[in-house]
Image: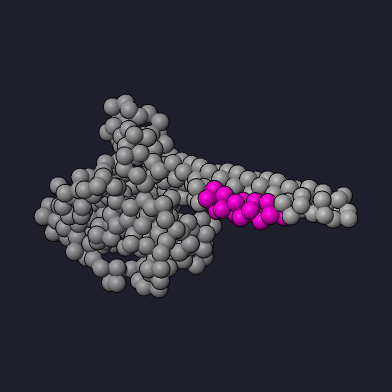
Amino acid sequence: MIASVGIISSSILASLAAYCRGNIAHASASAFLSPSPIKAATGAARSRRTVATAAAMLSSSSATAAASTAADASSSSSSIDDKSHLYMPSERDKHYDGNIARYLLDLHDERATFDFCGGMLFQLVLSDRLRSHLEDVASSHPTDASRQQQPVIRPSSQSLMNRVPGYDRSSQADNVMIFHGRELRGITNASGGMGYVLQLSFADPSGEITAASSAEGGIVPSGKGADSAWDGRAVDAQGWSTEEIATYDGWRSDQVRRWRDAKTYKAEGFEDFSEVFGDGAYGLNHRFFLHYDDGGRMWLCAEDGCEGTPSKRGGGLFGKIGGFFGGM
């Protein structure tokens, strides 16, 4: 871009100079023939000033364009570089050095979006309780205690939750391997401009799994298709309610599952739901886990297989129309 400006400027200068040199020569000759040599000399001086002024203007324009281009490039580079650790695997690994708790906190604090389905942008939001927990874990990194509580990113070979060793269909979560979360829609101020939020919340760390075969009477108090029961309690005021825990069936299709609106969330214990997400918001609870792909990108994946990766984009056409599909 800068080189092009220089070439154009040189070409224009050459043309102006040739034109003005002709005028200067004509004015100089006229000084001997004209009855008014002062007028002729003034014309020559004016022509010289024209060339000088044009040169100065073009030189200034070139310098301004070059400076502007350099500033834009610097600004763009700085903008990208400042946030590249949020979505570029190599920068992420170098920046966080295994402190995944800090990584999730930064994604939350930066109002980062995850790109689901090639353009549906969901802002990551952590509940206050989970954020506090992750802050404790991140701040004590890299102690042994921190390592035991650091969120785990599974390898690319385990890209679905049912491929993770020890998987069972239940409402269990431990804030390390598996997280409680919600897919929320209809949020007017969500990053990405599509009204989507992916909320993660804190799960009861004392909860235990009971297999269907050992449950009393073989009855498992959980959602349809569950093969295990989890006895964890609702310990996060912004997280899963007792009802969400007891009826969770996230391995089933969204179309047959129960979506909740703001009124329901409030009735089940999330008293400030409307203040946080708005009266028009609604959602569906999911269990989530983290995994890498073959290129080292991190994916946040729901139990039903829907997943997204940290994005630097603002969303495409597919993302904008995606909100018309799905929901209650």
Query: Can the viewer see residue 112?
Result: yes
Q: Residue furthest top?
A: 143
In the displayed structure, would residue 254 be above or below residue 137? below
Residue at image position (31%, 39%) is: 90
- Assess whether residue 222 is covered by the magenta stretch: no
- All told, the count of numbered labels is 0
Q: Quadrant of the C terminus?
A: bottom left
Which color scheme did the rendering employ for the protein? one colour
Query: 146 and 237: which one is in front?
Result: 146
Q: Is residue 119 above or below residue 105?
A: below
Where is residue 199? Give x, y as percent: 40, 54
Q: Residue at x 50, y 67 (%)?
A: 280
In-image side of 129 versus 16 (left or right): left
The one nearer the camera, 123 or 277, is 123
User: Does 117 appear above or below 18?
Assistant: below
Residue 12 covered by magenta stretch: yes
x and y, in percent, of residue 72 in the image:
53, 47
Comparing 108 with 7, the one in front is 7
Q: Would you identify the image quadrant in which residue 36 lies? A: bottom right
Image location of residue 26, percent across then percent down: 74, 55
Residue 68 point in image, percent of width and height? 58, 47
**Relative side of 244 to 218, left or right:** right
Magenta: main secondary structure: helix
Above or below — where is 142 with respect to 188? above
Identified at 36% across, 46% down, the residue is 87
Q: Which residues are magenta?
A: 6-23
Residue 42 or residue 113, whichever sits in front: 42
Residue 256 falls in which quadrant of the image? Answer: bottom left
Is residue 267 in view from this perspective?
A: no
Q: Quadrant of residue 176?
A: top left
